[in-house]
């Protein structure tokens, strides 16, 4: 996915922000499952999004669409794109991923990070003991989980919560945790 995302410097140039699940109705709307914490800003009218394939990749010939209007629907959004005015014109979007240039995303708040910035980060305890490297971030409830692999190959699932994660330094790719007793023995 790095090549498709246009990896440059210290991060990708584009991020996936939504998944088109299916057409909705007969007037060119599609149901979009937002993959962002700020769908109201990401899917605002006039914004141009890039259309990836069903595997989440951007191909060599990038297709873009301009959002005409958006409205909430169930747990997602109904999105209408300019020049796509009937069901047949949006059928091919079903199952495809939507991308946005990183420089078009809203600014992060103090203490926020993009999950891709956590991948590869070194995880240490508050005492400085190495735990491992972040391999994956899982969006679960009530807390997201960091999959951390130690040098010995052992995998730890660490809740990404303020109670455990004490410091995140995305620039240094370092996370400091204060795990409760027994968490690292699981």
Image (cartoon, helix red, strand yellow):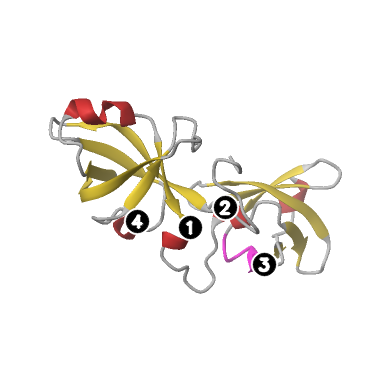
Single out the mark in the foreground, 3 or 2.
2
Q: CA distance from mark 2 to mark 1?
A: 7 Å
Q: Earlier in the sequence, mark 3 or mark 4?
A: 4
Classify mark 1: residues with Cα within 10 Å, few (<14), some (14-19) or many (20+): some
Instruction: Report which residue position mark 2 lands on.
Output: 12
- Where is residue 17? Give x, y as percent: 41, 48
Where is 14 relative to 90, above or below? below
Q: Secondary structure at mark 3?
A: loop
Region of the chain picked out in magenta, as a range: 161-171
The answer to whether 100 appears left or right of 29 in the picture is right
Q: CA distance from mark 3 to mark 1?
A: 16 Å
Single out the mark in the foreground, 3 or 1.
1
Residues tagged 2 and 1 counted as in contact (Cβ below 8 A): yes
Q: Earlier in the sequence, mark 2 or mark 1?
A: 2
Instruction: Report which residue position mark 4 lands on.
Output: 42
Classify mark 4: residues with Cα within 10 Å, few (<14), some (14-19) or many (20+): many
Residues tagged 3 and 4 counted as in contact (Cβ below 8 A): no
Instruction: Report which residue position mark 3 lands on.
Output: 171
Residues tagged 4 and 1 counted as in contact (Cβ below 8 A): no
Which of 5/178 is in front? 5
Single out the mark in the foreground, 2 or 4.
2
- Tell me the number on the disc at residue 102: 1
Q: Secondary structure at mark 2?
A: loop
Q: CA distance from mark 3 to mark 2?
A: 14 Å
Look at the image and tell me whether residue 74 can be seen.
no
């Amino acid at each position: 996915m790095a090549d498709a995302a246009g990896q440059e410097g210290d991060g990708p140039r584009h991020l996936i922000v939504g998944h088109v699940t299916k057409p909705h109705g007969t007037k060119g709307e599609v149901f979009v499952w937002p993959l962002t914490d700020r769908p109201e800003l990401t899917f605002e009218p006039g914004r141009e999004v890039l259309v990836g394939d069903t595997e989440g990749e951007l191909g060599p010939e990038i297709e873009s669409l301009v959002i005409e209007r958006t409205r909430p629907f169930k747990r997602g959004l109904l999105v209408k794109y300019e020049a796509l005015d009937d069901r047949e014109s949006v059928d091919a979007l079903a199952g495809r991923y939507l991308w946005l240039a990183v420089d078009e995303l809203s600014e992060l708040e103090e203490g926020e990070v993009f999950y891709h910035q956590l991948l590869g980060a070194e995880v240490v305890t508050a005492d400085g003991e190495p735990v491992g490297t972040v391999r994956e971030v899982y969006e679960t409830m009530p807390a997201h989980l960091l999959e951390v692999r130690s040098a010995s190959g052992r995998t730890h699932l660490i809740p990404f919560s303020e109670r455990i994660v004490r410091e995140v330094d995305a620039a240094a790719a370092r996370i400091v945790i204060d795990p409760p007793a027994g968490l690292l023995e699981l």
